[in-house]
Structure formats: structure tokens, C-alpha cells
Amino acid sequence: MMCVSTASFSLSVNGNTYGYFRGKSGLRQGNPLSPYLFTLVMEILTLMLYRASRLDKSFRFHNKCEKQCIINLWFADDLFIFTRGCGTSVRVIMRSLNDFTRMSGLVPSTSKSTIFFCNVPDHTRLAILNIIPFVEGSLPVKYLGVPLIASRLIYKDCKVLVEKMEGRITNWKNNWLSFAGRLQLIGSVLSALYIYWASVFILPKRVVADLEAKMRRFLWSQGSVSQEKAKVSWKSVCLPKTEGGLGIRRIGGYECCSYVPSYLEFAFEM
């Protein structure tokens, strides 16, 4: 608590610093202690959920989580809660969340929280929506920016990744960037957009081709549609610098096969 309560803050407005005040109940965003503090707090929520499931015999685990007795999974500020699609189980979850809110002061964000149903009758689904304040979402659900599916990705699943790269390049088009500057942005920014996706899923060949075409076009003609003819083949550009290339990694080099479960019914974000 000394680390939380003794920190001091100032506000930067239009490049000028104003004010000087002490923190009392939390850490600033980006503080190295934030992940540890969040982990400690989420452990309390986990214990509360498991305690409630033991005391209230009406609670039923999700049928895909019953053997392992899994109720929740969380990473960073993303939290999943799994339960059987019945009103009694959802009430147990909501009581635990309300108790946790009163204890910690952390309130689930209703605008960012979503509930997902799978094979739940309509009358049960409507009853659950009256119990819980979150909006209903549609599968597949995204977790940490990637869709959770058990099958191979198709192009429409990765469309958001292609659009995100295109958006970054569009923001840079009006800047007078040198060739070295564009190369640096490709290696440090554009490559980071797909590394996480490619480390989890096998990206479709069409997506790989689109992403590499956008990077190639940005490198040689700064993303212009009327692209300048490439002076060197992309295969040669992607060679290591020790072999005469520019050190850009091919997207296919990050791909690997990974299994991700697809059965989700209830999830929300703090």
C-alpha cells in the first residue's frame, strides 16, 4: 500500500505540466507494479467464485469445464467466466461479482462486457439476460484480439488484421518518410501486428499474400495504389542482413499450429 499511496502525479495538457497530487487507491497505467496488483486482486475473485460454487449446490459447471472444475480464466485485463446455461448458475456468478465489487471497488464495464450462449433454449436465454446486465454477443468470440475457433481460419476471420495494417499505412502516407524510415516502421510496427496472430493460428495464404503485398507496396512506393515497380524481389528483401537482405521476416515464418477451445458461453471484461 505504500507503493500505491505515496506515488505523486501531474497532468500534461498540450505539452504543459499542471498539478501535483498524490495517489490514494490505485496505480497509474503502465506502472510496473500494475500486473502484480491485478493478479493479487483477481486471485481473490477466483477464490470467491469457487467458494460460492461449493456453498450453493444449484451452481453447475459448464459441461466442457466440469471435469477440470474451471469457472474463470483471466489474462491481463481480460476475464472469462464459464457456467452452465441456467438461471441458477448465473445468479451465483452475479452474487459473487457483486460481493467482489463491494470489496474492491472494481466494477465490470457493461459497455465492454458480453455474454455468449451456445445451445441454450430461448426462454432460458431471455431469463438469463434479465439477470445479467451485459449485452449478448455472437460467436466466435475474440480474446486478446484473436478469434477463438477450433477450425482453421478463413479470410473473413482475418479481415480485421488486414484492415488494421491498411489503417496504419494510410496514416503514414502523408508523411515524408525516407526509405530507411519505412523499413524501420515495417520491422517494428507492421510486423508486430501479425506476429501474435501467426503465432497462434495458421494464417490463410490469401491473408499472407495481402499483408505482404501491403508491406511491399509501402516499402517501395509508400503505400500508393499506383505503386512503383519493386527494385528487388520480396524474397531477396526478406533475407537476413548477413545474406544481403533487409532483415524483414516472411509472415509464413511465424506460423504454427495451435488448438484453441471453441465452447464459450459467458464472458466479460473488467
Image (cartoon, helix red, strand yellow):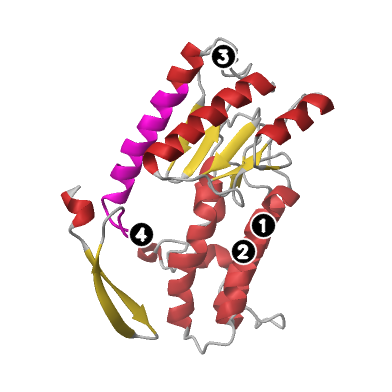
The residue that disc 1 covers is 160
Asked which secondary structure carries label 3, the reply is loop
Determine which quarter of the picture holds residue 235. Answer: bottom right
The answer for how far apart the CA atoms under marks 1 and 4 are is 26 Å
Question: Depth check: 140 or 259 in front?
Answer: 140
- Identify the mark nearer the N-term, 4 or 2: 4
Residue 231 in view (yes/no):
no
Which of these two is toward me, 223 or 133? 133
Q: Is residue 62 visible?
A: yes
Q: Residue at x 62, y 74 (%)?
A: 217
Q: Which residues are magenta?
A: 26-49
Regarding mark 1 in the picture, which secondary structure is present there?
Answer: helix
Whole-Å distance between the Cαs marked 2 and 1? 6 Å
The verdict on residue 108 being magenta is no
Query: Which residue position holds label 4?
Result: 29
Residue 149, x across and y down, in percent: 66, 35
Per the image, label 4 sits on a secondary structure element best described as loop
Cα distance between the residues tagged 1 and 3: 34 Å
Identify the main secondary structure in magenta. Answer: helix
Q: Are marks 2 and 1 in contact (CB under 8 Å)?
A: yes
- Residue bearing the label numbered 2: 164
Q: Amino acid at mark 4?
A: Gln
Q: Amino acid at mark 2?
A: Lys
Say whether marks 3 and 2 touch (CB < 8 Å): no
Residue identified by numbered label 3 = 66
